[in-house]
Image (cartoon, helix red, strand yellow):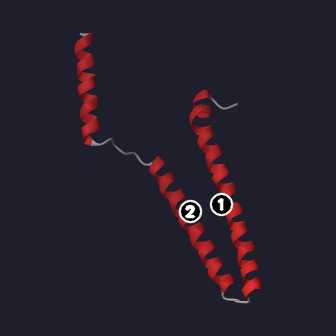
Amino acid sequence: MAPPSLKRYAWPSIATILLKGIAWRLTGSVEVIGAVGLVWLTGWLVLDPVIALLAAANIVWTGWQLMQRSAAGLMDSSLPADKLAQIHTLVDRSNKNIT
């Protein structure tokens, strides 16, 4: 069983990722079926590779976005300077109230 913190924060994002993956897989299937249907209806054989290139571009774009989000989650980053100043001000005030 997952710890409570993992349940609260990780499981919803994991479920979202899985659902998005299923949706993209179905979209890819619809693209393939649509390409075959269009080639069959129109007789334009060039449509199949064009739609395949569009599907490949979609896969590359989605993979790039996934890599960016994954890298951003692993990289350390700081808050903007104004937010850090607000935090320092609040901590200083609370320290003065304690002593």
The image shows residue 38, relative to residue 45, as above or below, that is above
Q: Is residue 66 left or right of residue 94?
A: right
Q: Residues within 10 Å of mark 1 (few under 14, many from 20)?
A: some
Which of the image's four quarters has the N terminus?
A: top right
Name the residue furthest front: 41
Instruction: Return the residue at label 1.
Output: 24
Q: Which residue is depicted at the point 67% across and 50% down?
A: 19
Spatial CA span between label 2 and label 1: 9 Å
> What element does badge 1 sit on?
helix
Closer to the camera in the image, 58 or 80 = 58
Residue drawn at (25%, 29%) of the image: 88
Q: Position of residue 82 (x, y in %)?
A: 25, 39
Percent of width and height locating residue 81: 25, 41
* Residue farthest top in this picture: 99
Q: Is residue 77 left or right of residue 11?
A: left
- Classify residue 90 by image quadrant: top left
Kind of residue at disc 1: Trp
Quadrant of residue 83 within the rendered picture: top left
Q: Identity of the amino acid at label 2? A: Thr
Foreground of the two, 10 or 39: 39
How busy is the neighbourhood of tag 2: few (under 14 within 10 Å), some, or many (20 plus)? few
Label located before the other in sequence (2 or 1): 1
Residue found 29% across the figure and 43% down from its top: 80
Residue where numbered disc 2 is placed: 62
- Residue for point 40% across, 45% down: 76
Q: Are marks 2 and 1 in contact (CB under 8 Å)?
A: yes
Looking at the rendering, in which quadrant would you find the C terminus? top left
51 vs 93, nearest the viewer: 51
Q: Which mark is residue 63?
A: none
Tell me residue 78's x, y (percent). Answer: 33, 43
Q: Position of residue 36 (x, y in %)?
A: 75, 79
